[in-house]
Amino acid sequence: MNVEKYLDDQIKKLKGNQRLSIPFLEKEKIVEWINNHVPKEPGVYLVFEKGEIVYVGETGNLCKRFLDLTKTYNHLLRVKI
């Protein structure tokens, strides 16, 4: 199988799954929002900027990972956002 086609197919599958847009809120409210809306299960997440994928990650607990992103130290992704 062509590697590029395989990767394109995988990206289409990921884009077709549940998509959440994280609102810009104060830290206390964003933590509450994440706890109420992000699943506490393993998953793959994509970060988009202007409709383009800029980051793909995987984690054993989506909620915990997103809460980790609210901490500003040592996160290039958080600094960029």
Image (cartoon, rainbow, N blue to C red):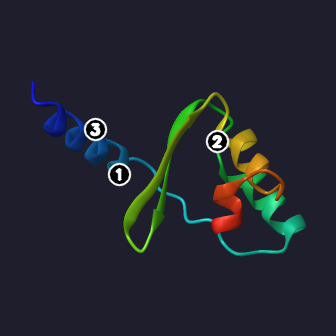
Distance CA(mark 3)–CA(mark 1) = 9 Å
Indicate the secondary structure of the residue bearing disc 2: loop
Q: Amino acid at mark 2?
A: Pro
Distance CA(mark 1)–CA(mark 2) = 17 Å
Q: Earlier in the sequence, mark 3 or mark 1?
A: 3
Q: Residues within 10 Å of mark 3 (few under 14, many from 20)?
A: few
Image spot of residue 78 (x, y percent): 70, 61
Q: Amino acid at mark 3?
A: Gln
Question: Which quarter of the figure is the C terminus placed in?
Answer: bottom right
Image spot of residue 7 (x, y percent): 24, 38
Q: Is residue 52 or residue 25 the one in the foreground?
A: 52
Left or right for 4, reference 54: left
Which residue is identified by label 3? 10
Image spot of residue 17 (x, y percent): 39, 47
Location of residue 54 (image quadrant) = bottom left
Q: Is residue 2 or residue 38 the one in the foreground?
A: 2
Furthest residue toward left = 1
